[in-house]
Amino acid sequence: MTMTTIQSTPGSSGYLDLFPDRKMSFFKNPYILGLTAVAGIGGMLFGYDTGAIVGAAGGGWMNDAYGRKKATLIADVIFIMGAIGMAAAPDPYLLILGRFLVGMGVGVASVTSPVYIAEASPSEIRGSLVSTNVLMITAGQFLSYIVNLAFTRVPGTWRWMLGVSAVPAIVQFLLMLFLPESPRWLFIKNRKNEAVHVLSNIYDFARLEDEVDFLTTQSDQERQRRNSIKFGDVFKSKEIKLALLVGAGLQAFQQFTGINTVMYYSPTIVQMAGFNSNELALLLSLVVAGMNAVGTILGIYLIDHAGRKMLALSSLGGVFASLVVLSVSFLNQSSSNELYGWLAVLGLVLYIAFFSPGMGPVPWTVNSEIYPEEYRGICGGMSATVCWVSNLIVSQSFLSIAEAIGIGSTFLILAAISVLAFLFVLLYVPETKGLTFDEVELIWKERAWGNNTDSRNLLAENQP
């Protein structure tokens, strides 16, 4: 088969070069935008800790067994139960149980939403659509500060704060009932008619026929492979291990460069910088959270234009510089010069400005597209588990380390980790912008077996 013929199939990125009229833009199809928005609502839900680790670990299996839609609905039910349980808890034990359930719901959603969106997205706008899920996360953080400010003087404040978190889950559950299952999952389960109906809402007729033919062929192959896949096979396949290393590594570095430390403790950091008013600290933190959401919107545009790798590298360079600024401001905290307090706030703002467009969406986007279909649930769950374990370690250790060695030195440690993250992305993370799932899979085969040809040559060699 010639290279031209190969690139004219919908399973290759060259397909859109030959048929530019079939290319989709971010706002071209309201259906896929609506699907993305509803699937991403789960990102607005908060509740971390051990429950999220358990939910993420089981979420991959749940995705494969029951589908992306049912997994999302299950996550919503678990979260709603947990939120109501926390708000009504008569004692600390039920409060902890409710928080655990909330975490489980978040863990399952963190695995499911990016995969669901990615599998329903055209490859040319997949990064932007998956990044919308991260926008929901940052929007949820922003709303949480507004809720905190709104309820600061309300009797029974903490119960209202916890109970209101059930609202996004209820909204998502109701809207999700009207959304379809992932078309790729339907193909794998041999439910072709349902899958074609879903795809007909995404693609125009000319491209629909090509996509259906391609996915039919691919799903037949994947279904045969899936029948023999076991959990332990992840560690037996060299290319899958490489993909998991990149996916889990990105998730770990996202947390160990300190993002959730900054978001969790931004009021505390602002107070440490010399702003002693609780309401002022919350207000400044609200500004930081707002910038996080705005930066993510920028990332939605850049991720399919600049590319995943370049965006992550640029982001990490800025993160390093801003962490150094934070470190300098706190190392000089004893100085009577109040400018160091404002320097700390500037460091926080710069950190968010650089982190949110890049290292915010990139790990989730890359993880949604680097695994073969038959491994996507298992590896996605394992990678998300690494994310939540890393999050737990950082959030639980930050204040203790800051008290032991000083917050300025703690930020220096995070800056050093950001350098390691930069090198990791530079050396190991491939660029997946505009590539189909199958082209990405060929990249791992090339890396695993030392083939010096590029992924397009490999694509040619693997065609009859």
Image (cartoon, rainbow, N blue to C red):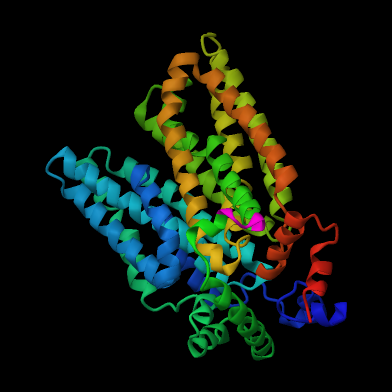
Foreground residue among 158 and 246: 246
Query: Residue 124 is drawn in which quadrant?
Result: bottom right
Foreground residue among 293 and 162: 162
Compared with 308, 229 (above or below) is below
For the point 57% across and 12% down, the residue is 332
For the point 39% across and 66% down, the residue is 72
User: In the rendering, at what x and y percent does residue 20 appear?
Assistant: 78, 79
Quadrant where the image shows the C terminus:
bottom right
For the point 56% across and 57% down, the residue is 234
Residue 238 belongs to the span the image colors magenta: yes
User: Left or right of 383: which side holds 434?
Assistant: right
For the point 71% across and 47% down, the residue is 428
Compared with 403, 388 (above or below) is below
Q: Main secondary structure of the magenta part?
A: helix
User: Left or right of 131: which side holds 71?
Assistant: left
Residue 185 belongs to the span the image colors magenta: no
User: In the rendering, at what x and y percent does residue 425 appear?
Assistant: 69, 44
Residue, far left: 90
**Is residue 432 in view from this perspective?**
no
Foreground residue among 435 and 238: 238
Quadrant where the image shows the N terminus:
bottom right
Query: Residue 412 is drawn in which quadrant?
Result: top right
In the image, the segment drawn in magenta is 235-239
